[in-house]
Image: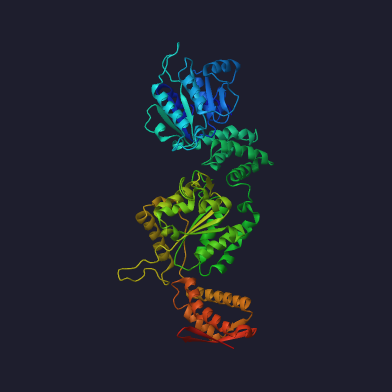
């Protein structure tokens, strides 16, 4: 910690405060926007400090020789920094009003304070905090509000810097505005105003988070912890809080300290749990269930029974899921904590089990298929359809409803999200996935951030399956060797994203998580046929109260019909069974009415003008 204190003494204030130091010489007014409700690293006499924006601004003015800062906001009225009897007497005489009394701050009263401070013969400044709350709508000002900002605009152009006795140069007594966004104040007041400096406050970077983690370390780590171990924990804490504010880090440290029961070996887990709870709430974490690791050991056999004919795809998907369970997804990256738990890109022929495997993985990891969230990306082919995912922007119909994707993740942060047929989405919509895959978060139309750090994302695609050679014949068929199938599908995915969509960065973020499915082989087609027939007959017995058995020759007839063309996979087999078995069986049972016997055998399927006819005995 001593080294940290020395670094703070030698260090510099944040860039936005250094910009304020310059603006005191050049601009009468300054507007701060962006990350204005955070805490900020400011060097103090004995170490780093973490003040809010008011404290940070005052630290800058104090170093520049200012005597006090008047802080005005529409809730608490007028206050002072520093708040001492001597300063209070001087300031109250200057601005002509009591400080610290609270009460509503009218535009007229605030304008009086601003004028007196800006034109004072003592070095001072005025900070208007929550400035956007002074008005109802910046686009439609009330007469009193319009007069207030018109007077402030004129003051910005007419105020002159002053040189006080004993000072080397001239400085303004600044008027400082704190707002959330650039458009929170009237555009005619802020745009093209050379006397108003606009300063954006960014989110903290990794260096800021590491320094803050060092400051907070004494509340989390044993005092006798070796320096190497300490550095490791500090780095992990900074990585776990990617995309969060320094204020969030303070809250996470407080949460972790309250939940710390064990020693050094539990520290990392406690910090990770606290960061997760801060992001997504106190929800049971299925990724940490001890039974999940046991389930993964024996999952291969169960998944192969459910997704027939895809042993390679099942094994590859399980590898990626296992990596997610261990928390090692993207381990080669410098900051992985906020990224999604795992990413899978299922590619291959239609009807071969891509969606079925996604459902099976949902049940395996989360124990509940309700954690499965599906988006058909063919519905998002238009650019404006992005509003459905994240919500309409402010001012548009449905703005307050939020987005389908952001709402779903907010309600179920631990879930599997399936984006079906991703290649059919508009390229601009795919830009949203860049942020999700890289930062693990997304901001909806209302400005709220949702986190995908505990979600498993699955994309499906049929890219490459319609490619044809010069003679118009399909390049890929059920007879294509697997190595050739994988190479061609993977290459087509790369070409599609890099050349047609011009989104090579999306492919980079998916990485090696592409899982290619096989065509349905003859043996697998027979197994799928048996599974679907059993499912149909079981449903008939439950719904119609009669048990139907297929004669051997009828079963063979149906099998030959259903598996004659396996290019459409299990979905094609199901379609044939619906036409040749379900429809005629439904007509025959309907004709029997209440007289249907408890057990029957299907002994004949006869072609007819209206379709197949079933013979039941």
Residue 186 drawn above or below residue 485: above
| Quadrant (top left, top right, bottom left, bottom right) of the N terminus | top right
Residue at horizontal 48 percent and vertical 71 percent from the top: 571
Image position, residue 134 (x, y; %)? 51, 32
> Which residue is most to the top?
165
Residue 509 placement (x, y as % from top left): 45, 51
User: In the displayed structure, does residue 288 sit left or right of residue 378?
Assistant: right
Rendered location of residue 25, percent (x, y): 41, 21
Q: Specify the farthest residue to the right.
A: 261
Query: Would residue 272 appear left or right of 261 to someone viewing this image?
Result: left
What is the quadrant of residue 93 in the picture?
top right
Query: Residue, x 44% and y 52% (percent of image)?
Result: 386
> In the rendered view, would you say 84 is above or below 223?
above
Check the image and report above or below for 181 versus 8.
below
Q: Quadrant of residue 362?
A: bottom right
Q: Position of residue 189 (x, y in %)?
A: 41, 31
Asked whether 435 or 95 is in front, the reply is: 95
Residue 431 visible in rendering? yes
């Amino acid at each position: 910690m001593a080294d940290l204190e020395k670094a703070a003494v030698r260090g510099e204030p944040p860039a936005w405060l250094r910009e304020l130091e310059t603006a005191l010489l050049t601009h009468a007014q300054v507007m701060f926007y962006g990350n204005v409700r955070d805490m900020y690293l400011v060097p103090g006499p004995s170490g780093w400090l973490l003040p809010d924006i008011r404290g940070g601004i005052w630290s800058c003015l104090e170093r520049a020789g200012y005597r006090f800062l008047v802080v005005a906001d529409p809730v608490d009225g007028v206050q002072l920094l520093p708040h001492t009897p001597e300063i209070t007497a001087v300031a109250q005489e200057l601005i002509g009003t009591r400080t610290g009394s609270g009460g509503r701050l009218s535009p007229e009263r605030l304008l009086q304070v601003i004028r007196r401070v800006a034109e004072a013969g003592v070095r001072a400044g005025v900070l208007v905090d929550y400035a956007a709350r002074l008005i109802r709508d910046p686009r439609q000002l009330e007469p009193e509000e319009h007069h207030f900002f018109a007077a402030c605009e004129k003051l910005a152009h007419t105020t002159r810097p002053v040189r006080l006795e004993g000072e080397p140069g001239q400085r303004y007594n600044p008027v400082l505005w704190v707002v959330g966004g650039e458009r929170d104040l009237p555009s005619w007041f802020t745009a093209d105003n050379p006397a108003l400096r606009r300063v954006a406050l960014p989110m903290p970077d990794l260096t800021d988070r590491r320094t803050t983690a060092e400051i907070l370390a004494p509340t989390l780590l044993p005092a006798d912890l070796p320096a190497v171990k300490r550095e490791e924990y500090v780095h992990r804490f900074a990585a776990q809080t990617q995309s969060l504010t320094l204020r969030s880090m303070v809250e996470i440290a407080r949460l972790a300290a309250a939940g710390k029961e064990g020693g050094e070996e539990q520290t990392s887990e406690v910090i990770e749990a606290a960061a997760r709870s801060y992001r997504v709430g106190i929800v049971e974490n299925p990724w940490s269930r001890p039974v999940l690791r046991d389930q993964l050991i024996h999952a291969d056999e169960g998944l192969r029974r459910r997704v027939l004919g895809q042993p390679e795809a099942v094994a590859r998907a399980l590898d990626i899921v296992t990596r997610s369970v261990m928390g090692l997804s993207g381990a080669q990256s410098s900051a992985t904590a906020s990224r999604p738990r795992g990413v899978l890109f299922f590619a291959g022929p239609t009807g071969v089990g891509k969606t079925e495997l996604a459902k099976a993985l949902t049940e395996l990891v989360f124990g509940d298929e309700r954690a499965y969230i599906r988006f058909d990306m063919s519905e998002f082919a238009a650019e404006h359809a992005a509003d459905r995912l994240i919500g309409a922007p402010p001012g548009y119909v449905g703005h307050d409803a939020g987005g389908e994707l952001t709402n779903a993740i907010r309600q179920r942060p631990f879930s599997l999200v399936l984006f079906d047929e991703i290649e059919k989405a508009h390229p601009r919509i795919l830009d949203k996935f860049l942020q999700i895959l890289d930062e693990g978060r997304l901001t909806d139309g209302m400005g709220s951030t949702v986190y995908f750090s505990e979600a498993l994302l699955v994309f499906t695609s049929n890219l490459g399956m319609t490619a044809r050679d010069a003679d118009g014949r399909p390049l890929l068929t059920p007879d294509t060797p697997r190595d050739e199938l994988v190479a061609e599908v993977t290459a087509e995915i790369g070409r599609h994203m890099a050349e047609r969509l011009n989104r090579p960065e999306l492919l980079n973020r998916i990485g090696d998580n592409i899982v290619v499915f096989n065509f349905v082989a003859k043996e697998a087609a027979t197994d799928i046929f048996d599974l679907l027939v059993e499912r149909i007959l079981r449903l008939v017995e439950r719904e119609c109260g009669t048990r139907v058995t297929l004669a051997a020759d009828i079963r063979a007839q149906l099998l030959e019909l259903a598996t004659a063309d396996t290019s459409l996979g299990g979905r094609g087999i199901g379609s044939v069974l619906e036409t040749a078995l379900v429809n005629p069986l439904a007509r025959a049972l309907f004709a029997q009415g209440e007289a249907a016997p408890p057990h029957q055998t299907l002994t004949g399927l006869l072609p007819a003008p209206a379709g197949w006819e079933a013979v039941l005995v």
